[in-house]
């Protein structure tokens, strides 16, 4: 795949600035213990839940409710052209991302406002049965899906760089790749999130996107281009990825973040091994924009320091 500047001819795009400055990916995912997605064709504005063909009052209220429950709400579209005015059922995905009890439900609803009946606390706490009882149209699904941000009204990079990834990845995994509204971190475009694990990637290419889904089918993740698992805080994401690279661990649910303090994060393997990772923040120089069109500022970056193995709780 061509380099970003070759694809766009736009060296001022925030994603190109990010790559040029070699900004680290690890520890940059959004934070959410679960996800709720609804298929909504047609155009999306800067704030997709309130600026689309979705009812804006419902979109605002449900978005606020999911955030309060530590969940992420987003819109999805199938790849390619489609009629956004044609009456249709709306595909829904609901996922809990917590290792050891991660799961995903899917189904179709005639009206997205039916999501108001979903038990968001059940999703947050991984209670799959309660979530199904609250919205019986949903049923468990075992195949992972990949969301790729294409919300160009939110950031130009996502549309320019995301859509080619959707096209390439959906050709090899039809029905498992979706265009998605804002996934966070425009400057890491193309960005993608694997569900139900909630693992986020950046600077994606078509080959890696296909590899991510193939690895998920084996219960594994791809270590390249990892930004973090949304289950954890950003510090926890960085610590987990640091340990993954240290020991070459690809198992999706092999590691968990068990404790955090001011200076360190403790990561545990399912076999009982523990690592303590020093995580610090530093001011990024030179100043850079968070997304296209925004003024550059001195943002904070996370860095991993000393890793101590063989510790006890």
Image (cartoon, helix red, strand yellow):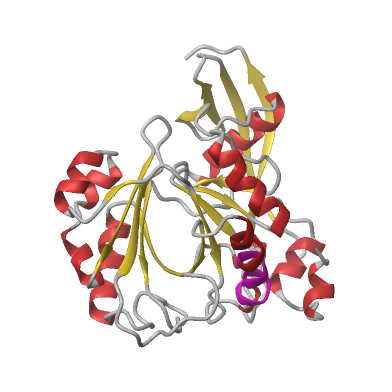
| Viewer-proximal residue among 141 and 153 | 141
Tell me which residue sits at (58%, 47%) in the image: 213
Residue 69 lies, with reference to residue 250, above or below; the image says below
Q: Position of residue 80 (x, y in %)?
A: 55, 76
Task: Return the x and y of residue 115 as percentages of the image width and height.
Answer: 22, 63
**51 sits left or right of 13 in the view:** left
View extreme (bottom): residue: 85
Quarter of the image where the N terminus is located: bottom right
Residue 146 locus on image (x, y percent): 53, 55
Decide whether residue 260 is among the magenta residues: no
Magenta span dominant secondary structure: helix
Residue 94 visible within the image: yes
Query: Is residue 168 shown left or right of residue 67?
Result: right
Between residue 79 and residue 311, name the one nearer to us: 79
Q: Is residue 131 above or below residue 6?
A: above
Q: Where, by quadrant of the figure, is residue 296 drawn?
A: bottom right
Identify which residue is drawn at 56% across, 63% down: 148
**How many marks do you count on the picture?**
0
Q: In this rendering, does residue 26 appear at all?
A: no
Eyeballing the image, is 305 above or below 177? above
111 in relation to 240, above or below: below
Considering depth in this image, is 76 or 263 the residue closer to the camera? 76
Q: Which residues are magenta?
A: 158-166
Q: Is residue 273 left or right of residue 11?
A: left
Relative side of 122 to 30, left or right:
left
Q: Position of residue 73 (x, y in %)?
A: 36, 62
């Amino acid at each position: 795949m061509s380099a970003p500047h070759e694809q766009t001819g736009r060296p001022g795009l925030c994603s190109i600035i990010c790559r040029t400055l070699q900004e680290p990916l690890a520890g940059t995912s959004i934070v959410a213990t679960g996800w709720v997605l609804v298929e909504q064709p047609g155009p999306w504005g800067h704030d997709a839940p309130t600026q689309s063909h979705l009812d804006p009052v419902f979109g605002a209220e449900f978005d606020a409710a999911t955030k309060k429950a530590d969940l992420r709400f987003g819109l999805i579209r199938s790849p390619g052209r489609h009629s956004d005015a044609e009456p249709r059922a709306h595909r829904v995905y609901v996922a809990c991302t917590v290792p050891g009890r991660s799961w995903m439900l899917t189904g179709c609803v005639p009206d997205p406002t039916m999501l108001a009946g979903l038990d968001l606390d059940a999703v947050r706490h991984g209670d799959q049965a309660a979530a199904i009882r609250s919205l019986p149209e949903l049923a468990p699904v075992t195949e992972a899906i990949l969301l790729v941000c294409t919300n160009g009204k939110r950031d130009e990079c996502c549309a320019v760089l995301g859509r080619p990834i959707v096209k390439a990845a959906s050709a090899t995994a039809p029905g498992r790749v979706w265009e998605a509204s804002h996934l966070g971190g425009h400057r890491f475009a193309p960005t993608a999130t694997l569900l139900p694990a909630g693992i986020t990637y950046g600077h994606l290419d078509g080959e890696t996107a296909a590899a991510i889904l193939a690895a998920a089918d084996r219960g594994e993740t791809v270590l390249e281009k990892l930004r973090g698992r949304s289950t954890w805080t950003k510090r926890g994401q960085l610590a987990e990825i640091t340990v993954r690279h240290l020991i070459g661990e690809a198992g999706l649910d092999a590691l968990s973040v068990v404790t955090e303090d001011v200076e360190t994060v403790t990561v545990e393997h399912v076999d009982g091994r523990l690592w303590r990772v020093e995580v610090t923040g530093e001011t990024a120089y030179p100043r850079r924009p968070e997304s296209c069109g925004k003024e550059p500022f001195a943002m904070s970056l996370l860095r991993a320091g000393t890793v101590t193995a063989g510790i006890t709780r």
